[in-house]
Amino acid sequence: MTKKTRHFAIKEILSTRQIASQDELRLELRKKGFDVTQATLSRDLKQLGVGRISSDEGAHYTLQPESEIQILRPVVGAQVVSMTANESLIVIRTLPGCANAVGEFLDAQHKGEIIGTIAGDNTLLVIPQSQSKTKRLMELLRGQLIEGEQ
């Protein structure tokens, strides 16, 4: 399995469970079919920006919000088929069944730039905050989702 799928699995595990140790995370990864060494897991955690925080239940690993964005951006971008715009609206075509997920991601990441999104099965209508910013927003979204820019 690829590094990318392993990183996705780590993110999924850390998003759904409190993991206290690397050994515990290695066991969870093994259940998902990933057999990794401690050194590989340590590198993965560093690359993903995973931190360790203390809470009432004890210390556990957690993804930092920016790390989640960096991980999700290429996943969401892979769902985008095309983008087009007129003077005031942006239309994004996605793989079947993916428009809602792309819309949720954009709503969360671009709160000040997007009034909202309306999703069908494979088409997403993006409503910019201002008509004058439509072109700039289109370029930003194209760069982030299709070209993979930060």
Image (cartoon, rainbow, N blue to C red):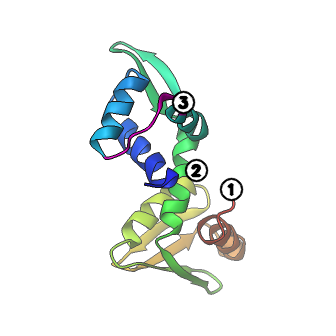
The answer to whether any part of residue 16 appears in the image is no
The residue sitting at 53% across, 67% down in the picture is 77
**Residue type highlighted by circle 3:** Ala
Q: Are marks 1 and 3 in contact (CB under 8 Å)?
A: no
Residue 54 lies in what quarter of the image? top left
Which residue, given by chain and number where applicable, does mark 3 sit on?
39
Of the two numbered discs 2 and 3 on the same chain, state the one appearing first in sequence. 3
Query: Label 1's element?
Result: loop
State the extent of the magenta-drawn residues as a range: 33-39
The answer to whether any part of residue 21 appears in the image is yes
Numbered label attached to residue 150: 1
Instruction: Give the CA distance from mark 1 to mark 3.
Output: 28 Å
Alpha-carbon neighbours of circle 3 within 10 Å: few (<14), some, or many (≥20)? few
Residue 51 higher or lower than 120, as above or below: above
Nearest to the observer: residue 19 or residue 44: 44
Q: Is residue 100 magenta?
A: no
Of the two numbered discs 1 and 3 on the same chain, state the one appearing first in sequence. 3
**Residue type highlighted by circle 2:** Gln
Query: Label 2's element?
Result: helix
Q: Main secondary structure of the magenta part?
A: loop
Q: In this view, does 50 lie to the left or right of 113?
A: left
Residue 59 higher or lower than 75, as above or below: above
Residue 62 spot, x, y in % from top left: 46, 30
The residue sitting at 38% across, 31% down in the picture is 25
Q: Do the residues labelled 2 and 1 touch (CB within 8 Å)?
A: yes
